[in-house]
Image (cartoon, helix red, strand yellow):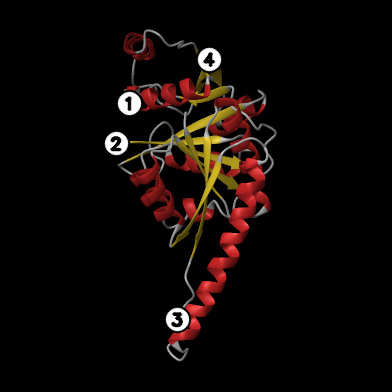
Amino acid sequence: MKKIILATDFSKGASKAEEMAIAIAKKHISNIILLYCFTPTYVDPTMPGGMVIVLDEGKEKQLEDKLSRKARSIQEQGVRTTFRLSTGSVSDGIKTLVEEEAADFAILGKTGASGFLDKILGSTAEYVINNIKIPLLVVPENTKSIDVDRIQYATELEYDENEILEEVFEIARKLKAEVDFVNVLSDKKLDLVDNAKLIDDMKKSFPNERLNIQSIRSNSVEKAILELSESKENTALVVASHHRGFLEGLLKPSVSKSLIARTNVPTFVFHFE
């Protein structure tokens, strides 16, 4: 693992993401690319053009100084760090960096159910998820973990998941993390596929990976997943997006979105076609 994008807005919610990015970068000898995106000054038709330029130049200089200090602070902790100030949306800023720097994944902070993350999970969410081909690691402000030793993969065991499994195992190898599988059994859920056959097919597709699946019974899939993930140290959750719609994949879209909004556990969002 070579490069990690750390998107920040310098808020309290971003500080835990920074802490986690540093811990992961140190452990795996990676570089951090610090990213801040800002929107240019709104142009009032009555405002002289020269004044708009001066305002934006001053804002850029302030932000560059702030990014430079932050990057220097991270470097002093033993992690090689560069920074990028991008004009425009967070979506485009991350997408451009992914294309130019071939980063392994991006890290974002989350404060409660709002804040900087809303710029990713708001109106531009589907564009971001479906246009960048690396995982996003969403780090809640109140998370207790600053490293990832285990990745909790929640599966419904209802369809072929090999494509997303390939990505999950790849990031697990890069992080030297174990993958824990959990299947929540519910009386409300229809079991339309032979679970044993699906598991057997998964084992044949990934003969070198450990595929022990823990089944737990609960009428609340979301609650069961959250409680299990929060009971283990240094665990990250996995949810997925699909081309059919935002976060439609491993779990129902409403469950996936709610997990990201409510969890205090770092959560990987993977894209698959």
* Residue 129, picture quadrant: top left
Q: Are marks 2 and 1 in contact (CB under 8 Å)?
A: yes
Disc 4 element: strand
Q: Are marks 1 and 3 in contact (CB under 8 Å)?
A: no
Classify 10 Å Cα crowding around label 1: few (below 14), some (14-19), many (20 and above): few
Residue, disc 4: 214
Report x, y in % for residue 163: 32, 26
Alpha carbons under labels 3 and 4: distance apart:
56 Å
Instruction: Nearest to the eye among marks 4 and 2: give it.
Output: 2
Residue 246 horizontal/vertical position (percent)? 39, 45
The kind of residue on which mark 4 rests is Gln
Q: Which residue is mark 3?
A: 43
Decide: few, some or many residues near mark 2? Use Cα within 10 Å; few <14, some 14-19, many ≥20.
few
Three-letter code, disc 2:
Glu
- The residue indicated by pointer 1 is 163
Q: Nearer the viewer, residue 27 or 180?
A: 27
The vertical placement of 58 against 182, above or below, is: below
The residue type indicated by label 1 comes to: Glu
C-alpha distance separating marks 3 and 2: 39 Å
Residue placed most toward the observer, 120 or 66: 66
Q: CA distance from mark 2 to mark 1?
A: 8 Å
User: Any mark on residue 273, and which?
Assistant: 2
**Which circle's residue, 3 or 2, is located before the other in the chain?**
3
